[in-house]
Image: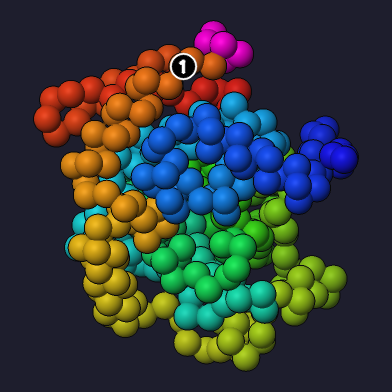
Amino acid sequence: MSARKSRGNATEKVLSPEEQQAKINEVKKLMGPIADKLPVLCSDASIMRYLKARNWNTKKANKMLKETLKWRLEYKPEKIIWEDIAQEAKTGKIYRANYTDKQGRTVLVMRPSSQNTESTTGQIRYLVYCMEHAILSSNSTDGYMVWLIDFHGWNTSCLSMKVTRDTAHVLQNHYPERLGLAILYNPPKVFESFWVMVRPFLESKTFKKVKFVYSNNPDSQKIMEDNFNSDELETSFGGKNPVGFNYEDYSQRMIEDDKKMTHFIDSGCSSPTYKAILSKSQLLDSAASEVSSQPSDKESDNDEIPINLKLPDDRKLQVPSATTSDSR
């Protein structure tokens, strides 16, 4: 029997393993034959993330999954290489730590005060690159990761509502259930006002995974002790590891990661996360055929706006766009 668990103003469904599997099977049925052609994107574990993100609503999860397929065909995140985003990475504003948390989850370090470019497109592209490679390197069984956000040197001049909004959209719509924990380390008092503005862009689940930690507060410091090995954690986060970000070393590390990514692609995979059993041209043909032939969801006809995705051979793939109600 399913149950419900209250979380603030939201109510999250809690399903038995049997009920969860039934929901997964229903989404696969809604996806049609393409589910068999994209075995990782449409794996049980992947579909489970989309179902959780849409509170086990199969139609909404199916729609979200198809929108991710459309986004990946258009954006090609697995094709972004270090040369494309190296300039964005120079200040260490985002990088993958060389340690994990105590659960073995990949750690992404973020320093918003180290922003060094003005292009929103470039910043989001670098974020996507970091997400793809964090997933590629993950040894976590559940696929979750941790974000360590260092507010040293942060002030209101670092604010960008557009980048914040675009970031939330990409992460929540195309990387659902990837965030296990976000630690905001030493945010200044003025950040609280910004946090109030950011709140509407975040789903309730995401909001509850965010923890504020202050170096002068023993209670909040316990969060660091519970989640990290102090010998591995950087000194900037209260740990004992004096080694910080080094651009040259990190560059070499990412170039090696690019080789791993290339290996996946050359092996006939669309990405390390969404391995396809078809060639690229077959994948595009299948996606165009299966997604465009899917019957419209009558429940959401009023909030779907068709988008034309132009494919290399000038055919068009028509799928519903993301909506405001589904992206929050």
Q: Which residue is nearer to you in this view: 1 or 140?
A: 1
Residue corresponding to mark 1? 295
Q: Is residue 176 left or right of residue 17?
A: left
User: What residue is at 79 percent from the left and 39 percent from the top?
Assistant: 12
Q: Quadrant of the N terminus?
A: top right
Q: Is residue 236 visible?
A: no
* In the image, residue 8 lies in the stretch drawn in magenta: no
Here the colouring is rainbow
Question: Which residue in the rendered view is the most extreme toward the left?
Answer: 313
Q: Which residue is nearer to you in this view: 208 or 118?
A: 208
* In the image, residue 301 lies in the stretch drawn in magenta: yes
**Residues packed near mark 1 inside 10 Å, few (<14), some (14 to 19) or many (20 plus):** few
> Is the stretch drawn in magenta largely helix, strand or loop?
helix
Give x and y (percent) for residue 124. 38, 47
User: What residue is at 43 percent from the left and 21 percent from the top?
Assistant: 294
Give x and y (percent) for residue 82. 25, 64
Q: Is residue 81 above or below residue 8?
A: below
Q: Is residue 158 above or below residue 168?
A: below
Give the magenta part as a residue range: 298-302
Question: Which residue in the rendered view is the most extreme toward the top?
Answer: 302
Q: Quadrant of the C terminus?
A: top right
Give x and y (percent) for residue 56. 69, 36
Give x and y (percent) for residue 194. 62, 41
Q: Amino acid at mark 1?
A: Pro
